[in-house]
Image (cartoon, rainbow, N blue to C red):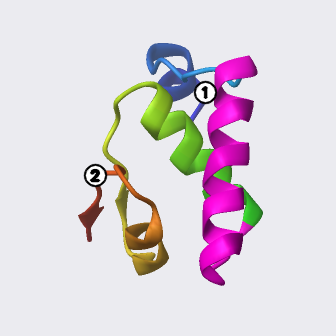
């Protein structure tokens, strides 16, 4: 695991990530479709860095503009 962690880039969480997190959370609350906090952060990082999460959690489909692959 340590070797993998050293070789794999991990996107950081900064100001833009926090802005996206807030927008996503607010949007989902307004729709009455909240998702878990950790998943909000995952979505924000993915959107910021133009990444596509591969997940079995279908609630990510609630997030506008987030491309996902359902595993």
Main secondary structure type of the part rendered in magenta = helix
Quadrant for the N terminus in the image: top right
Report, in whole angstroms, how far the alpha carbon at label 1 lies from the one at label 2: 29 Å
> Is residue 14 shown above or below 46?
above
- Residue ID at (52%, 22%): 3
Quadrant in which residue 51 is drawn: top left
Q: Is residue 16 magenta?
A: yes
Mark 1 in CB contact with mark 2 (< 8 angstroms) = no
User: As drawn, is 48 to the left or to the right of 32?
Assistant: left
Q: Are there few (<14), some (14-19), or many (20+) residues within 10 Å of tag 1?
A: few
What residue does disc 1 label? Answer: 2
In-image side of 49 versus 13 (left or right) = left
- Label 2: element kind: loop
Q: Residue at x 45, y 15 (%)?
A: 7
Q: What's the residue at 48%, 17% (across, down)?
A: 9
Tag count in the figure?
2
Q: Which residue lies furthest to the bottom in this view?
A: 32
Q: In this view, does 6 lie to the left or right of 64?
A: right
Residue 67 is marked as 2
User: x, y (%) of residue 6?
Assistant: 55, 15
Q: Give the label, 1 or 2, closer to the camera.
A: 2
Viewer can see residue 14? no
Give residue 70's quadrant in the image: bottom left
User: Which range is magenta?
Assistant: 15-36
Mark earlier in primary sequence (1, 2)? 1
**Residue 48 percent location from the top left of the image:** 49, 28
Quadrant of the snapshot with the C terminus: bottom left
| Viewer-proximal residue among 39 and 71 | 39
């Amino acid at each position: 695991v340590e070797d993998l962690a050293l070789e794999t880039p991990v996107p950081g969480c900064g100001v833009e990530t926090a802005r996206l997190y807030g927008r996503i959370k607010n949007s989902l609350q307004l729709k009455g479709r909240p998702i878990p906090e950790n998943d909000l952060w995952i979505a924000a990082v993915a959107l910021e860095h133009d990444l596509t999460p591969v997940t079995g959690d279908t609630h990510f489909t609630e997030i506008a503009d987030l491309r996902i692959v359902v595993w």
